Amino acid sequence: MKYAFVFPGQGSQHIGMGLDLYRNFKSAKDVFDEVDEALGQHLFDLMTSGSDADLTLTTNAQPAIMAVSIATLNVLEQEFGLNIKDKITFVAGHSLGEYSAACAAGVFSLADTAKLLRLRGSAMQQAVPVGMGAMAAILGVALEDVGALIEAASDADNYCVLANDNIAGQVVLSGHTKAIERAVELAPEFNAKKAVMLNVSAPFHSPLMKSAEQVMADALGKVSAKDSMPAIVQNVTALPETKKDVIIKNLVAQVTATVRWRETMDFLNEQGITDIVELGPSSVLTNMCKRAYKNIYAVAPHSGTELEEIANNL
């Protein structure tokens, strides 16, 4: 049995996330309290009793999702005796989840990770005027046809790019609003089963995020970091890395680059990973894994009972 821990990205947030862990485990409460202190904000209150609109704001959603992921890991480690360095072969995270993975693997401290994600969310939000950028999910298109769709939807003034290559037949495009709208309109001509605009506040993982990339380069260049243990399979390369300088370089590039999640999962599969455990508030990555990799057992534990079972099986 070979295990990998994976960490979800934006969109997995929901009001009430983490509350059960907070109430039942001091190790989880400590995480939420430390994130609140690092940010100077009652983020946990917002997560559990705030509004969907406020939680969905990029600046709140990114550190909040990370907090739930690390609280879940803390329960596994401190309550149930799991040692991630001994038991887990790889970690990986989808977009902001890569920061959660880096925190889990000891690259960044919890407080620094929260601050980095608050800055990342703010920088991404401010990179493009509201309405200028958009994203869309395209389902059922073969990967070789995605490039043709992007070319057909783009022109000299308005373009779109491949933002997320999630699994076979599920991609997300990002870019100028006009180009994304054209891509959705043209998608049926490229055999798409479905194409839908996403309710996001900015065109993430596109060249339009260039100013945010520079902000993160400056911040990541100053943060204290350590080598990763276990290795992180990174979004921009879909390959494992342990050296802190390379991890940071790839995290900077990740702001504007494609999230290569399909290739990341292919790599884990090729390395003989038998079990994927998603640590976070939802089951988004688990569900994608189940659809694409029938030979990998995927699970997203949320309760103390489920976490204890995971720890006992590792």
Image (cartoon, rainbow, N blue to C red):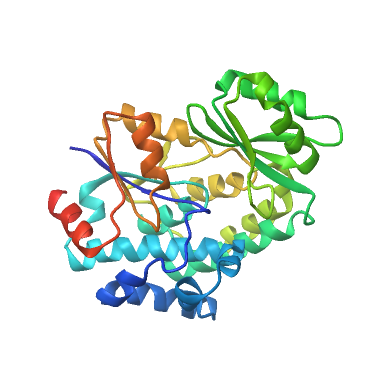
**Residue 98 in view:** yes
Q: Position of residue 164 (x, y in %)?
A: 56, 38
Question: What residue is at 68 percent from the left and 34 percent from the top?
Answer: 161
Q: Is residue 71 above or below residue 243?
A: below
Q: Is residue 240 left or right of residue 83?
A: right
Q: Position of residue 148 (x, y in %)?
A: 69, 20
Q: Is residue 14 above or below residue 260?
A: below
Quadrant of res 29: bottom left
Q: Which is more toward the observer, 271 or 165?
A: 165
Q: Position of residue 218 (x, y in %)?
A: 64, 59
Q: Position of residue 32 (x, y in %)?
A: 40, 74
Residue furthest out toward the left: 312
Question: What residue is at 69 percent from the left and 47 percent from the top?
Answer: 203
Quadrant of res 4: top left
Q: How many marks?
A: 0
On-image quarter of the N terminus: top left
Q: Is residue 77 left or right of residue 235?
A: left
Question: What residue is at 65 percent from the left and 20 percent from the top?
Answer: 190
Residue furthest out toward the right: 157
Q: Which is more toward the observer, 248 or 70?
A: 70
Q: Which is more toward the observer, 232 or 66?
A: 66
Q: Is residue 149 above or below residue 56?
A: above
**Residue 232 in view:** no
Question: What residue is at 76 percent from the left and 23 percent from the top?
Answer: 152
Quadrant of res 128: bottom right
